[in-house]
Amino acid sequence: MKRTAQYETLLLNVGKWREVEEVARTYGGEQDRAVVFLSRAGNGHFLDDQRDFLPLWKGNTSVRPVHFHDQVLFDAVATMRRPIEAVKARTHVTSQVFARFEGQPRHYGFWLLRSDG
């Protein structure tokens, strides 16, 4: 039987804690900048292929940790895609209810969809 080893760690010293806070603050700021950039009217095409956006983004920022830009970009694109995918899924479910049911069951299905959200 396998067991998970759980080791206790010591508390971070002040210097390391400040480094962690700085990385978190920088990450949040960079992700906010990326989301604002992606939300502008002419930049929606970057949501389809984020590889086009990565060179532009790397040249536009001063943060230099390894893979930092990639993760910021990945999270920003996911943040922008999430509501779009939710609308697509809801539209799909609505169309399936309409296609598969008639009368009272259809009315009940639409009522369930409306009261869900």
Image: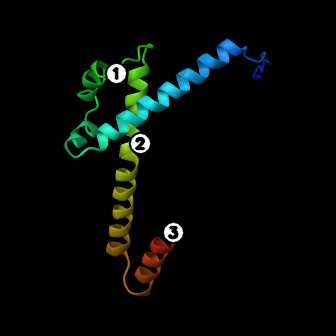
Q: What whole-number distance in Å separates the C-alpha atoms at marks 2 and 1?
A: 19 Å
Q: Identify the amino acid type marked 1.
A: Thr
Dot 3: few (<14), some (14–19), or many (≥20) neighbours within 10 Å? few
- Residue under pointer 1: 61
Q: Which mark is residue 12?
A: none
Q: Where in the figure is residue 48, as x and y percent of width and height?
A: 25, 39
Q: Identify the amino acid type marked 2.
A: Thr
Q: What whole-number distance in Å separates the C-alpha atoms at marks 3 and 2?
A: 22 Å
Q: Which mark is residue 79?
A: 2
Q: What whole-number distance in Å separates the C-alpha atoms at marks 1 and 3?
A: 41 Å
Q: Nearer the viewer, residue 103 or 26?
A: 26
Q: Identify the amino acid type marked 3.
A: Asp
Residue 101 in which image quadrant = bottom left
Q: Where in the figure is residue 115, as x and y percent of width and height?
A: 50, 74
Q: Nearer the viewer, residue 33 or 2?
A: 33
- Residue under pointer 3: 116
Residue 7, compared with residue 115, is above or below; it is above
Q: Where in the figure is residue 98, as x and y percent of width and height?
A: 34, 75
